[in-house]
Amino acid sequence: MKQEVFLPEDYRPAEDEPFMNDRQLEYFRRKLIAWKADLLDDTRDTLEGLQESTRNIPDVADRASEETDRALELRTRDRQRKLVAKINSALRRIDEGEYGYCEVTGEPISLKRLDARPIATMSLEAQERHERREKVHRDD
């Protein structure tokens, strides 16, 4: 059983403390859980909205507009579903003690990067190399 970590409300991870100490891990865990809860709330709202808006619209233009809106909403939800999977993966990495380290180099990922994108799995340098390689292969 894990021990509860006290985290002051104004806590922000700092470079001058040990990397991925209990407080930093708890900070990112809470950030990820809150983000996931927001996404799931949005998904629930969307499902309720889609169920309510299954009415028959006689005007063809209005119906087409409604269908376009629904398709866009469903694409957005699909992206959010993938994001929830990445959040779950990040939470798993926290539990396994792998969170915060680049999956390519094994080096720590900067706290600023993790704070901006808590699901990051690569350091900024490794991510940029990856994207450059991807671009080269796409341009072939």
Image (cartoon, rainbow, N blue to C red):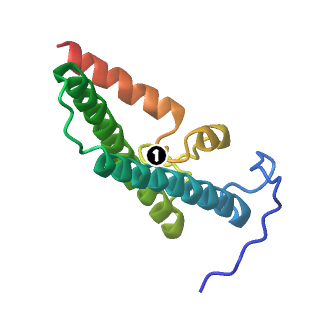
Which residue lies most toward the top here? 139
> For the C terminus, which image quadrant?
top left
Locate residue 114: give its quadrant.
top right
Which residue lies most toward the bottom here? 1
For badge 1, the amino acid type reads Thr
Question: Is the residue marked by circle 1 packed among few (<14), some (14-19), or many (20+) residues within 10 Å?
Answer: many
Helix, strand or loop under label 1: loop
Left or right, 18 with respect to 48, comes to right
Say if 84 sits above or below 78 in the image. Answer: below
Locate residue 61: give its quadrant.
top left
Say if 6 sits above or below 25 in the image. Answer: below
Count of numbered labels shown in the rendering: 1
> Residue at 45% across / 65% down in the picture?
92
Say if 97 sits above or below 28 in the image. Answer: below
> Residue at 46% across / 46% down in the picture?
121
Q: Position of residue 60 (x, y in %)?
A: 16, 22
Give the camera-side residue of 85 and 81. 81
Left or right, 116 with respect to 54, comes to right
> Residue at 51% across / 69% down in the picture?
95
Which residue lies most toward the front here? 58
Give the camera-side residue of 43 and 78. 43
Report which residue position mark 1 lands on.
121
Q: Position of residue 55 (x, y in %)?
A: 23, 43
